[in-house]
Amino acid sequence: MPKAVKNIELTQMPAIIDDLQSYDGAFLLLRYHGTPVGKIILPARGGKIILADHLDEIRKATKKRLKFAAVDHFLFSDQQEQIQATGIRATIAVCTRNRTDDLKLCLDALMKLPDSGQEIIVVDNAPSTDDTKKLVAQYSNVRYVLERGKGLDIARNRALDEASHEIVVFTDDDAIPDTDWLDKILRNFDSPLVMCVTGMTMPFELETAAQEEIENYSPFGKGFFKKQFSFSKSNPLATGSVGAGANMALRKSLKDEIGGFDEALDAGTLTQSGGDHEFFARILLAGYQIVYDPEAVSWHRHRRTWKEAVNAIHGYGVGVYAFWTRLFFEEKQYSIIFFPKNWLLHTQLPNFYRSIFKIKKSYPLSFLLAEFRGCLKGPFAYFKSKKQVNQLKKENG
Amino acid sequence: MNVTASLIIPTHNRSASLKKMLNTLELQLYPLQNFEVIVVADGCKDDTVEMINNHKPGFHLMLCELPGLGAASARNKGASVANGKYLIFADDDMELSTDFIKEHISLHTNERIVVIGYSPFKLESRASIQRMGVREWWEIKFREMRKKDHRFKYDDLTSGNFSISSEFFKKVNGFNTSLLCREDYELGYRLIKAGAEFRFAYAAKAFHCDEVTNLPRSLQRKKSEGIADIQIKKLHPDFINKEAIYYLSQRSISKSVLMKVVQYFPSLSDSFAGYGQRLMNYFEKFKLLSSWSTMNYRLHQYWYLRGLLQGAGSSKALYEYVMKNDLLVNEEQKLTINIEQGLKRAEEEIDKSKPLAIDIYYGKKMIGTVNYEPGTEAMKGDHLRKVLKEKFSQELAAVLFPTEIFTKNN
């Protein structure tokens, strides 16, 4: 049941979307003068969607955000974007491993960003071939960095070290950012208090059932309103709604202030994920702000096969419990013990119930089971991974 | 002596940090012969005086001594002996950027300008929650002041990093020395009334190496602020104290009881507050952030109320002081604008007539009123968009919602 993914500009809404022959519907990101205001999935009939038939649904999906977008357009559209942090420059970092097909799409998109003096580096993480190196060589303005230590967080720390500019903007190798993405990210660094900015991540394609279910179960987008996170406003340990590492920017100085990413966490290690969310928590605990700006849009290509999707969800489960384990034992954030209970009672168990009794809006049972198994593994995975990291460090002196 | 700028530093028994500060002043990019530094040693019992007398820097250095009259008196004293056309006030524990003096002076393009510099709060690693909160409060304030749509208010003036022409400072009679604290706000209030134009200088950076702000001090200060706010209200009957109004306008039985207890048995309520304060240590230890924040907020409110009551004498008097605000704005000083014809035009109209209050219309629809607020600079065109966004988003949305998108044409 593939869905086409499309941008729809509400001020120039086409009457019909008619190039959907191989799809049974479309995922639409709805924009008003470019600003994302909502998303909707509409069914296609005979390869067509007649948008005029769905105006009420579109209105419902957008009205909360649209009214403020209309106000902003009236107030600020004739003004030049106020980039307060003048002269702020960025290093874009792509951490990758053996995925040149995805990486090529990503780099091609980065080539389309307007030049505001940014530097681009690709951190090749423990590669088994030199394909990535060869690909990067085709881009004259992209710097290749080889990192032999396996693990996404090791690569991220390397990127923070290698970056020549103050802000390091991370994108996943399987994500394709919009052309105004970098500007929309950078405008938020308007105070030394802002140490991290995250953007909104949308699905790049929904060609398979696995991709659709992943987007449905665990969307990377965190809503259409800008949000500011800080320890004084919300619980700094609850970083699930902050954003994700696929679309985030950090100040390089964070590495000295709060330490780098935890190299026992995230892809390439036993913990499989969680490195970004654990890092967000430490940023907030140090009294800094994180801004989520949904206008900084990037498109993530979810894993295509069912097996990969289940593995990814399993990995989320492991990662979440692993990073909670770190917060408990290393950061001494004892109140984290309430999180597993709340998640289980208010989300996981109701999800199981719905899935088993096939109640509307339920998720695939295989996802729920995989995630739950992951949760149980998480704490052990963290300790084991930590041990491995320490051992490797010892070996390398 | 012929100098342009006088840097005035009041100090009280902090010889070591003052020495460190004086040592870095020679690095100022402003010509050393064009400024003087006036240290006002206020009740110093350490070796400050000796240190200054032995210090022979490349700039003019002057020492005044006072017997411990407080920072406001010390700053006035420094101003009274200053030779410079402009006075720059700094604290004795600051680390100034090398273009500090240069930036301050370069913004003085007319006699009514008051320049406020950027004073980031330096935080040690593993700082307490309370100190992280203080840093956040300051940085949010500075972020707003940096934007061109910021409408300056009396409480933007920070006594530790601002500059003013000495003539203007004399004209408004300097700091009021009778206040318990908040003498900077009170000066800011009079300056705005006298037509001052506040400017923010991000590059005039002074790191504040304050190591003494902690919870007990912060609470004690909150009480002083309550007392000072009543003093200010007595000096300026038109002063609107939003903080106190917010607190007193939500009446409830528990609050009335609290008011009575605070008024008649303050030692009883103080000891309860003391228990709360002790609890906060445990909250911090076990990282129970939300409990900590709630208690922090309550205790600050308590001590503020305690100060207000002490200043006013009784709860009845307090309500009278705080709630009595009859502001009459002349119809002549009120402007009506219509933003349907474009914001640029409305902004020009505001800049032309410098109104105290504004009625805003979109076509025939009333959007809202920007009221006169004493102690706030006159409205400028640059402020309009921010006011509309922050105060009248809902009203504007009702008019501007693009319904045409959702109406079928066929």
Image (cartoon, rainbow, N blue to C red):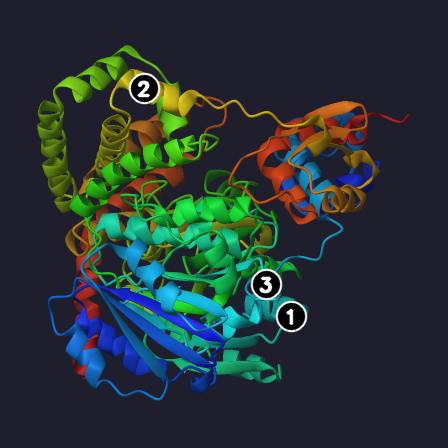
| Inter-mark Cα distance, 3 to 1 | 15 Å
Question: The residue marked by circle 2 belongs to what chain?
Answer: B
**Label 2, residues with CA under 10 Å away: few <14, some 14-19, many ≥20:** some
Quadrant housing the N terminus of chain B: bottom left
User: Which of the two residues, A17 or A118, is positioned nearer the viewer here?
Assistant: A118
State if disc 3 and disc 2 touch (CB < 8 Å). Answer: no
Secondary structure of the residue carrying numbered label 2: helix
In the image, taking residue B380 as reference, residue B323 lies left or right, namely left
A285 up-or-down from B115: above or below? above
Give the mark toward the camera: 2 or 3.
2
User: On the same chain: label 2 and label 3?
Assistant: no
Give the mark toward the camera: 3 or 1.
3
Q: Residue at x 44, y 21 (%)?
A: B324
Question: The residue marked by circle 3 belongs to what chain?
Answer: A
Residue B31 appears in view: yes
B213 up-or-down from A50: above or below? below
**Label 3, residues with CA under 10 Å away: few <14, some 14-19, many ≥20:** many
In the image, taking residue A308 as reference, residue A232 lies left or right, namely left
Q: Position of residue B336 (x, y in %)?
A: 75, 31
Q: Amino acid at mark 2?
A: Ala
